[in-house]
Structures are given as C-alpha cells and as structure tokens.
Amino acid sequence: MKKWICSILVFVQYNMIAQQTNQNFPPPDTPPQIHAKRVQGTIKIDGKLTESDWQNAIPVDDFFRMEPRQGGTYKHKTEVKVLFDEKYLYVGVFCEDSLGQKGVRVQDLRRDFSEGENDIFSIQLDPQNLKQYCVSFQTTPYGNQRDLQNFNDTTIDNDWNALWSVRTHRTDKGYFAEFGIPFASLRYDNQKKGEDVAWGITFSRLARRDYERTVFPAIPQSFSQYRMTYAAQIKGLELPDSGVNLRIEPYSLYKYTTTDIEGEENSESNIKFGGDLKWAISPQSVLDVTVNTDFAQADVDRAVNNLERFNIFFPERRQFFLENSGIWAGASSELVRPFFSRKIGLEGRFNAVPAPIDVGTRFTDRSDKRTLAGLYIHQRETDNSPGANFGVFRYSQNYGKENNIGIMINHRLDEKNNVLAVDQNNNTTTTIDGLIRLKDKWTISYLASATYDEQTSKWGQAGSIFSEYSSNRMKWGWSTDFVSKDYDSKTGFVFQNDVIRHNPGGYFILRPKKLPWIRRWDPGFFARYQHDFQNPEEFQQASLYLFPVYIFFKDNSFVEYSVTPSWQNINFDFEPLGLSIEKKRYFYTRQFIRYNSDRSRKLSASVKYEWGDFYNGNRKTVTAGMRYAPLPHVALTADYEHNSLKNIGVQREDLKTDLYSASLRLALSPRMQVSSFYQYNSFDKRGGWNARLSWEYMPLSFIYLVFNDTQIDSFDPVQRNQQFISKITFLKQF
C-alpha cells in the first residue's frame, strides 16, 4: 500500500510540473454581440429556412472548438441566424456535415434525450442577465426536444418543460433546425421605451460522429456551454409586454386495478380529474398550483441490490416536483439533501405505497440579485397514514460575480388521527448554504442544516463543504459531509446517520497529441475516510479508489481499470441481502475493469467485471448491457447484473443474485412513442412490466396509455398487481 501511495504522489508531482501551462482563459471584458432582426413577413416552423427573412438575417458562424481539442480548426461548420416578431424568438441553424444524412447519429426520438449520445444543437438564454442561471433549448437532426435549467454551471434541472417548437430538415450537406420560442415561455424584464435590450446567449453543437463540440462564443473546455459569464449579448430585440402569461393544464384519468393473491382476485376502477396552473405574475415571479395531482405517467424505479452500508438514493421522477428543483438547498447532493420531495406522497415514513396529494402550490421569484421561493403540499389521509402538510421556504442572495448565500426552512406537520391512534407531530429543518466562485477555476460550496422533531424532542445537525479546482488540465477537490445521530429531516434525505465522511481526490486530464485515437486520459484517485459524528475517534470505514486507466477514445468509447483497498469496522448489526456480517474489523481489496463501446452507434455494448475479497469472503460481479438502435425510430436495450458471494458472514454463506432488465422503444415521430420496460430480481423474486404509449397531440398536451404488471413470488402467498391507466392532458397558454 505504501508503494502505491508513493507512486501516486510522484506521478502527481511530475504532472503538476509538466503541465504548468494553463489553457483556461477569462471571459472577455466586452462580450461579442449578435443582432436579431424583426420579421417582415411570416415564419413557418418547418425546418427549411426558405423565407426571405432568413436570407436577410445576419449569420453567426465563428464558433470555437471545445472538444476533442480546445481551439484550432474544426471539421463541422455551423451557421446561426436570429429573428423575432411580436410573439416569438426564432433561431435558424444550418449544421454542415460532409456525409449529410449518412453522418447523423441519433439514438432515439424521446424527449429530454441523453446529451452525449446524439448529434445536438443547443441554445442557452439568460434573459435577465443573471450570469448564474440559464435555460437551454436543444434538438437533434430528427427534431426531438430537450429543455432544461442550469444553475451556476453546476446543477442541471433536466425536467423543466417549456412551451416551444422546433422542426428539422436533413439534407446531403447537413441538417437545418428551426426554433420557435414564445416570449411567453421566457422570464425577462419588461422593455422600457427607447431601451436597448441585451440578453445573454450561447450556442453549442455536438457533431457526435467525431465527438466535436463547438460553441459560440468561446468557452474553455473545462466548463460547459452553460457558463453564462462567457455569454454573448443578443441585441436589437423589441420585447412584448409579458401580459397575463397564464398556463393551465387540466387532466382526466381512468384507472382499472386488479390484485390477485393465490387466485383470489379483487378489482376496482375509478375516474379522476385534476390539473396544474402556471401563472407568470411578473417577469421574475411564477406561481404554480396543482390540484388532485396524479403521476401515472412517471417512470418506474429501477431495482437495486444494496450490498453497502448506505441508504440508496432514488431520484425524483414526478414532474411537479422536478421543475425548479434546483433552487432548493442541497439540490445537487445525493448524500445530504435537507429537502427531498420523494418524502411527499407516501404512506408513512418507510411505506412506499403512494398517498394522494390534494393540493400543492409553488412560488418562485428570481432576479439578478436574489431568489425567493416557497412550496406547500397537502397529502390526503389514507387508511394507513394520517394527513400531512409539507412547507418549504427558500431565500438566496447573489453577491459578487457568481456567488450566493441562502437560507431554507422546511416543515412537516403530520395531522392527528384518532382512528390510527396517531398524535400530531411537527418536524422542522433549517438550512444555510452557499456557493463561492473565487475564480473561474475555483468553486466552494457549503451547507449547514439542523432539525428538530417534536415527537422525540431531539435536535440534529448535518452539513457539507466542497471545494473544487477545475481546469483544462486537471480537476481536484475535497468534500466533507457530516450527519449527527439525531438529524431527522422528515422532508429530507441523508446517506447515513452518525457519520463524518472526508473525500479528497481528483484526476489529471491528459490529451496525448501523439496518440490521436485517445481523446482524453484521466488518471487519478479518490480517498474516503469515515468516522462517527458522536465519537470522532471511532473509525467506520476507509477506501482508496485508484484509477490509473480511465481513457476516452476518439469515438468516446471508454475503458477503465481501478483498484480499491478498503478498511471496514463493522460495529453494528449489518445484514446486506440477509447475510449477517460479524462485528469486527476487515481489510480487503477489490478491482474492476469496464468497457463501453461508442454509444452513438446502432449497436453498442458495455461490460464490467469486478472481483476481490468482500468482508470475510469473496465477491464477483458481472454487469453487462446492450443497445440496438437500427434507426432512431426503434431502440432495444437489455441489461444484466450478476453477483456471486462466497463464504460471507457469520454463517459463511454463499449467495447468487441476478437482476435482469430490458426495454423497447418505438417512435412514429418525436411526438408519438410506445415504450415498454421489464425487470426481474432473483433475490426477492420480484418482476414487473411497464408499457406506455405517449402522444403529444398538441405542444405539451398528451394522451397516455399505461399498463403496469408486478408479481412478487417471494411473498407467501404470491401476489400479483395489474393496472391499466388512460390519461389525457390539455395545455393552454394565454
């Protein structure tokens, strides 16, 4: 072990000397400008750019290469033009490609597609010139849409949905894209008479075949197109008044459910109505209201076999809670999250059965100086749980160039229920957090949180601090997270109680000029050391994650080899997957190697093999995946995970688990798709189907048909549950 550490230190020192030249550059003192011209005729969003207004628009074509090497000549030229009228901001794009349609790489036609797997063109807008926030509108050569919010080039809210349209047209010389973004879908300050408006804007293109990313204006490759301090300014806009800016989205739903327990079948059906309302009270302020909320179309969770001592983090999948989720303290953390919306809408604290939501409201007010937000949800009582009220208040103040500090208070009130013999209980969490960007390359974030629970009369503390240095040559950082034994946010998530975890480490970013088939090589290490919060001298666990081989090839295929020495102190009752681990100290070393092929090709695959000791025994894990997409309208995926554990625990037991999943997606167009998903876990003998038809018959108005089938063979008696759901939503924007 000492030899490993010494080798790493020598390697780090050598590379720091050899790579003193830093290719990062600061934002320009005077941002470049783009001129938008008013439309004289009529623009039809068809992806062809044939109108005379497009011919007279001023082009932008001086893009800057970020990948695979920063700067220099790039292969794929891009030309962008900007127009506007009294309702829309129009962006017309031509993405040149010498192979034309044959060069297109698009994996499927779903909305909110994966960024690194497709040809993409994206627009980032900062209409309020906040410099710390932007919205992004993205498309592929087939016209599927992705929209998102980004906060400080750190947190991405992929599930923000806006009302906009895009159409594309593929030719033998490349592809055209034509965006129509309603001003009503953007938040901006009203234009005063005679005022010259200037919005922040960036463009980005990924030509996936060569993994060539170009941007306008120039941004260092250590950042992304969302770093709005580098943004250009769009001039010449004549903005309409924001007006009423009201959006309503009612829905109706029919659900038929059958439950079969050893041949005894019960069924029920119900009809449900509800809806959402979004009102832009002002350019800065937005009010969202949801009534009788339903999440029938949300994706199902993927099964996990947890062999670690930590709680598993399952991401939020419900649309109302996903939108604007990046404003809450700790939103980007999976270790300490004082507000975690998945605690809402469940029967009890540990019961995963959904509970209905009667009403909810969210208010957001964002300006260049501060963010003010609030959330209230009422959860209806059920036969198994009392009614509950959830409230969150958030205030964040911007200062300096890219810094902020904030406070958040979230509260849960469980109502008294005489039938269930449950008393009223209040649970409150208070959090202070912030971000400091000392320089473009240095970022520090921090969070300190405290809870008080009325039922137990106990206070608890949790928090984190993270510092990162990021440049074109390297990325290094240190994080420390802590959670006290009594920290109990009934509206939050923590990875573990009574723990302090330190996690320093990082990696170099090498781009060998003499090896052009390697895009980047990122060797490095991360160390992790954990001890009790209450008794800091009590060690919990430690590990070194050493990855000397971490290579992205020219086509973005990838290979990694790593070794992880681990030290464990099991001083508590620990039974991963039912295997009782003896209370004592352990040392073991594990290794793995993994490979992903080029994910943009019609056929791609991934495989990972992990081996080594595990506590007092041995564990081998094989993970494999495959995707076949002969054309963007069809995509088939299959994944498999196998665990083989031998001589584990007090009883020296053997255990094998298999986890299978497969999915099929068929798309007539980006707006009409059928998808199915199957998974089976041999450990608990639980299997399930999910099938869904989604038709966007009008912008952001959908018809869904959903079928769910779950069977649990490990229960005695065997249980099977089936659901058929039809849901129609209608969106109208005023």
Image (cartoon, rainbow, N blue to C red):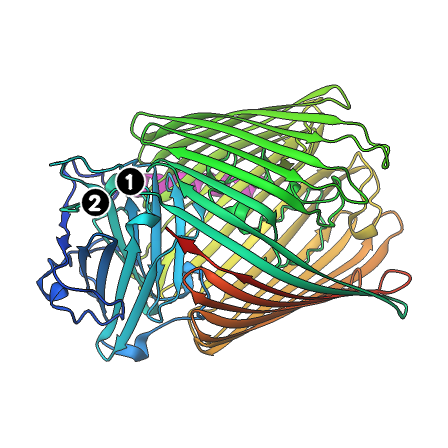
Element marked by disc 1: loop
Q: The magenta stretch spans which residues?
A: 1-22
Q: Are marks 1 and 2 in contact (CB under 8 Å)?
A: yes
Element marked by disc 2: loop
Residue pictured at 34% horizontal, 44% vertical: 134
Question: Residue 28: in sight, yes or no?
Answer: yes
> What x and y, as percent, mark residue 184?
32, 48
> What x and y, as percent, mark residue 606?
54, 67
Identify residue type, mark 1.
Tyr
Q: Residues within 10 Å of mark 1 (few under 14, many from 20)?
A: many
Residue identifier under label 1: 188
Give the position of the N terminus as an image quadrant: top right
* N-term mark: 1 or 2: 1
Does residue 598 appear left or right of residue 166 in this picture? right
Residue identifier under label 2: 239
Identify residue type, mark 2.
Leu
- How many numbered circles does the render carry? 2
Residue 392, compared with residue 123, is above or below; it is: above
- Specify the farthest residue to the left: 56
> What x and y, as percent, mark residue 161?
43, 53
Instruction: Determine which of the numbered discs, if any, sits on residue 675 in the image.
Output: none
Does residue 578 appear left or right of residue 306 in this picture? right
Q: Residues within 10 Å of mark 2 (few under 14, many from 20)?
A: some
Q: What is the CA distance from the residue labelled 1 to the residue labelled 2?
A: 9 Å
Q: Residue 668 or 576: which is nearer the viewer?
A: 668
Residue 9 falls inside the magenta stretch: yes
Residue pictured at 31% horizontal, 68% vertical: 167
